[in-house]
Structures are given as C-alpha cells and as structure tokens.
Amino acid sequence: MPGPRPVVLSGPSGAGKSTLMKKLLQDYEGVFGFSVSHTTRNPRPGEEDGKDYHFTNREAMQKGIENGDFIESAGFSGNLYGTSKSAIEDVQAKNLICILDVDIQGVMKIKETDLNPIYISIQPPSMEILEKRLRDRQTETEESLQKRLEAAQTDLELSKEPGVFDVIIINDDLDKAYEELKAILSDEIKKVQEAKS
Ligand code: ADP
Ligand code: 5GP
C-alpha cells in the first residue's frame, strides 16, 4: 500500500516555513516526519546537526551529489542545500507524512521525480514585512539578507506560474496561516491517524 503523500513547503526565506512546520511536528506527533536536508551553511544558534540539517562542507556534499545520493540540490544564498534519498526514505519507512522544506529550485527539480508531493508555498504579506522578519530573526549578515531578499523576488514571480504550487498560503496572521495549512493537510493527516488506530 502506498504511504501518505509527502508535503513540500516552499516560499521565500523568512516567510515562516520553519515556524509553521515546527507547530505541525509538535501538534501531530507520530504523523509528520521532517526530511532533514544537507547544507553547507553554518548552523545557527540552537540548530542541531542531524535534526535541523545535516551540516556538511561543499566537498563532501558535491561528492554525495555525484554519487547520486540526492534527489535534488541547489545553490541558495552562497551555500549548497539538498535532499538526500535517505532523508526521505527514513521518514517514509515509518509511514509518516514526509515534510520537505526546499527553495523554488528544489520544487522544480522534485517535479521531475516520482515523489508526487503536495506543493505548498508559504508567502509573506509583503516584501517589507519579509525584510522585517528576516532582520528581526537576527540570523543573517547584511550580505546574506540581501541575497535572500533577491531570491525572494524570483521566488514570488515563479510562484505565480500556474501549476507550480497546489496552494499558496499568505502567512500574515500566524494562527490563521496554521489553520489553513492544517485544513489542506487534513485528509492526509486522517489517513495516517486511522492507519495507526
Ligand atoms: P522561514 O523558515 O520561511 O525562513 P521562519 O519560520 O524562520 O521562516 O520565520 C521567519 C521569522 O518570522 C521568525 O523569526 C518567525 O518567528 C517570524 N514569523 C513567522 N511567522 C510570522 C507571523 N505570521 N507573524 C510575525 N512573525 C512571524
Ligand atoms: P535556511 O538557510 O534559511 O535554513 O534555508 C534557506 C533556503 O534553503 C530556504 O528557502 C529553504 O527552503 C531552502 N532549503 C532548505 N533545505 C533545502 C534542500 O534540501 N533543497 C533545496 N533546494 N532547498 C532547501
């Protein structure tokens, strides 16, 4: 029997993907599993290796990509990011809904695979609010912040193309955005809960 459909969460950096995803993972223990990506960027305070990301270096990651270990990878804001096959397999082996947090390049590449996820874009109410959220998060240098804002423009443009995303959620009020997200995923959540009961 096929397992639950994976979910791709995408959208500009700072739009609120991690915040929403962490709420889902907390509120639905045993339903969702996070696909832990690899990245060459440095860990932020509080981030754990193997939980938030597999933190690695460019050489090792490039080797992995050449070996065919990744279903997709992309350069973002001066670093490499990628989803390994085993990151997804680890979650699917437990029959959980696999959540992937990837940028728009990742979305396009996943579309060429047979993963068949639900594609959701989390977007900010405006570029001004996005910039404020990124600044207030205090995780970026000015350079990295500017790169993320540039990438956000491209992301928002591409997201408007028909068929790229199944749903676009504007994350203005967090509680409202979370309710929308849960509603979109309710069928899939039910399937997993029923299979467990
Ligand atoms: P992403 O994972 O998309 O890069 P985050 O989840 O880290 O974004 O959110 C960016 C920042 O904005 C965080 O500091 C987070 O607490 C804050 N944030 C997220 N959603 C909202 C919201 N609806 N209103 C205000 N601040 C928010
Ligand atoms: P951050 O550095 O803020 O954690 O992530 C930066 C961007 O990289 C975000 O847009 C996030 O969605 C994206 N990202 C994280 N993991 C992956 C991945 O495995 N593949 C791709 N393509 N993008 C990723």
Image (cartoon, rainbow, N blue to C red):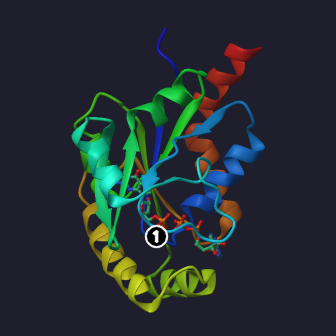
Q: Quadrant of residue 174?
A: bottom right
Residue 45 position within the rendered picture, expressed as x and y whole percent measured from the top left: 66, 71
Residue 42 position within the rendered picture, expressed as x and y whole percent measured from the top left: 50, 69
In this picture, is 49 found above or below 29? below
Residue 64 position within the rendered picture, expressed as x and y whole percent measured from the top left: 31, 42
Q: Identify residue for label 1.
A: 13
**What residue appears at the point 25 percent right and 49 percent down from the top-left corner?**
108
Q: Nearer the viewer, residue 13 or 177?
A: 13
Quadrant where ligand 1 appears = bottom right
**What residue appears at the point 23 percent right and 58 percent down from the top-left corner?**
161
User: Would residue 17 appear left or right of 116 to someone viewing this image?
Assistant: right
Q: Nearer the viewer, residue 196 or 138?
A: 138
Which amino acid lies under the numbered mark 1 shown in the image of this protein?
Answer: Ser
Badge 1 residue CB within 8 Å of ligand 1: yes
For the C terminus, which image quadrant? top right
Whether residue 123 can be seen here? yes
Q: Secondary structure at mark 1?
A: loop
In this picture, is 63 found above or below 186? below
Whether residue 164 can be seen here? no
